[in-house]
Each structure stands twice: as C-alpha cells, then as structure tokens.
Image (spheres, rainbow, N blue to C red):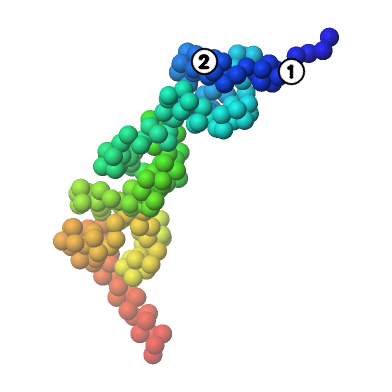
Amino acid sequence: MKSTDKRIVWKEKNDLELLVLLNSFITKYDIKTVRDYQTKMREDTMKVPSLWLINKRFGSWDKMLLSLGMKTYERYKWDSYNDSELKKIVSDFVTDNNIRSQRKYEKISGGKNLPSLSTLKKRFEDISFFFKIEHEENMNTFQLLTLLKEEIERLELESSLSRTSFEKLYDNSKIPSPSTIVRKTGKSWEELMEILGFNYREMKVKRISKNLKQNA
C-alpha cells in the first residue's frame, strides 16, 4: 500500500486552515521559539506542518506569527522596551552575574528572559559598554584592589609590577584602567602595590639597577 506523503496533506490546506491549526498548537503548548515548535512537532509529526512548509507558505516563522497577530519572541518583544529600559535589564544581569565578556553573557543568558547579543547589537550597534566595567563608579576600593591583584597575577607581573607593562597588557573588559583605579582610590601605583602585599620598592630598585648595568 502506498504511504501518504505528509507534505502533500499539508499542501492541500489553504493558508487560513494552516493558520488556525498553527495558532491552536502554538497556544496549547505556549510555544515561543522555532526550537520550541520543532521539539513539540517531533512528538507527533502529523499534528502540524514542518518548518520547511511554514517557511515556503508564509515566508518565514516570524512572518507566520505576524499573520497570527503575534509578536515574535525575540525580535519584536524587545522592541517594546526603550533604550533605558533595555540597558537596565542587561546591566543589572551583567552586574549580578559578574559578567565581563559577550561570550559569558551569551552562555549564561541562554534560556532566560533576556535579549540576545544579536538583538542588543541591532539596537545599540556597539555593545562593548555593557562589558567594560560600566559600573566602575559604583565599585568600592576593596573591589577595585581585588580586580587589580587578580589581573596582575593573571598576567604574571608579580616579579616586576611595572605599571607600563600592566597598561599594555591588561584586559579592559575585566578591569578599569590603572588611571581610574589611582583616581578612585587616591593612591599612587606604588602605594597600591604595597597595599596589595607586594614589595614594590625593592622590585623597582632591582629593575633600575638592572637597567643601569645594561646601559653601562
């Protein structure tokens, strides 16, 4: 017996019939994304048409949702937020989760009620400000010193503590600039190194002596 081609069954339905069926399915399972749809569709492929047919008939998943009078989960949902509101949502999340890179944001925000990186880029173009210690003005001295020590150790500069070397190598997405730290703490670079437990003066003397010998 010749099996029925499922695609032909769906092709025989007109747009209105398909939209009624899709609307019922999407509402019943509270489907928000294409991934949600595909997951539920696999449970019974006879209930709804494939994504291939939806794209062919309506142009895209988003256009199909618009035909149903629905906003898409991602692109249009965040359109209802103004710039300040969107910035606050993302900034609060970034601060609460100590996020300092776009990669970490993408990893942690997945599955949460947050705009994607692509959505943020469409709105703001350059989104680096979210991850460049935008909240440094709210940091206290302890937090700044902790970040500074961690970055010195990451760069393995404990044996020199050179501010010049640090400024060339530090990751500005993880920590404010040395000038900002000096300004906010009211301490010189030498004083900061001493507070962090490093013997900066001794290292400075050794470095100067080494330079003198090399230039002699």
Q: Nearer the viewer, mark 1 or mark 2?
A: 2
Q: Identify the mark at residue 166; answer none if there is no mark.
A: none
Q: Identify the mark at residue 5; answer none if there is no mark.
A: 1
Q: Residues within 10 Å of mark 1 (few under 14, many from 20)?
A: few
- What percent of the width, then of the height, locates residue 159? 37, 65
The answer to whether 176 is drawn above or below residue 115 in the figure is below
- What percent of the width, then of the height, locates residue 34? 53, 28
Q: In this view of the protein, which residue sits in the foreground, 81 or 146?
A: 81
- What percent of the width, then of the height, locates residue 71? 41, 28
**Disc 1 residue type (three-letter):** Asp
Q: Quadrant of residue 194?
A: bottom left
Q: Is residue 34 visible?
A: yes
Q: Which residue of the protein is positioned furthest toward the top in this rendering?
A: 1
Q: Is residue 22 visible?
A: no
Q: Which residue of the protein is positioned furthest toward the bottom in this rendering?
A: 216
Q: Residues within 10 Å of mark 2 (few under 14, many from 20)?
A: few
Q: Which residue is mark 2?
A: 20
Question: Circle 2 sits in a helix, a strand or a loop, which is it?
Answer: helix
Q: Is 28 left, or right, of 142 in this rendering?
A: right
Q: In this view of the protein, which residue sits in the foreground, 97 or 152?
A: 97
Q: Identify the residue at horizontal 56%, vertical 29% (top origin).
A: 58
